[in-house]
Amino acid sequence: MRKPQDRSLDDAVYKWFCQLRSSGLVVRGVEIQAAAERLAKQEIKNFKGISGWLFRFRRRHNIKNKKICGESLSADVEAIGPFRQKLNDILKTENIEPLQLYNYDETVLYWRALPNSTQASTAERNTPGRKTSKDQVSAKVKSYVQ
């Protein structure tokens, strides 16, 4: 494994990274690069935190990109069974056929999107996740069933 050109910069960036992750904050690769450039500006001339530098930094410190956002990371498994039963009851009482159902999530525009992954040490066993933001703009849709 290749050693860093400036050990003090490498240590400072890793310390910064660890502080953010211990606070539970999301850290993206571009943020690591920007922090390295900010810290290097004081000591090292012509430093560029390019993708090759980031790749080696992540490899030296055993940092991986982990998904933190999505349905599978925040699913309440115990609530699925009762929800399915309640939905089936509603469909039967309202006499609704499965062909009359559609997924409205697929017809919206989401905004305020937060990062859906973070850089995290492989030593972190649990990377807490969250559901994707459902802030949206939608259009009124009329569905005609025949």
Image: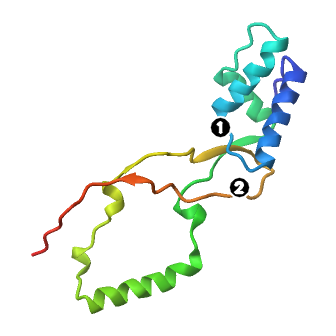
Q: Mark 2 points at which residue?
A: 127
Q: Residue furthest top?
A: 45
Residue 98: x and y, percent?
26, 78
Residue 36 lies, with reference to residue 42, above or below; the image says below
Dot 1 or dot 2: first in sequence order is 1
Q: Which residue lies furthest to the right in this view?
A: 8
Q: How crowded is mark 2: few (under 14 residues within 10 Å), some or many (20 or more)?
A: some
Residue 53 lies, with reference to residue 69, above or below; the image says above
- Return the residue nearer the eye: 1 or 128: 128
Side of 97 where 22 appears, left or right: right
- Quarter the N terminus occupies: top right
Classify mark 1: helix, strand or loop.
loop
How far apart are the alpha carbons under marks 1 and 2? 14 Å
Label 1 amino acid? Arg
- Quarter the C terminus occupies: bottom left
Q: Name the residue under label 1.
A: 28
Residue occupying image coordinates x 36% and y 60%: 105
Classify mark 2: helix, strand or loop.
loop
Label 2 amino acid? Thr
Name the quadrant containing residue 91: bottom left
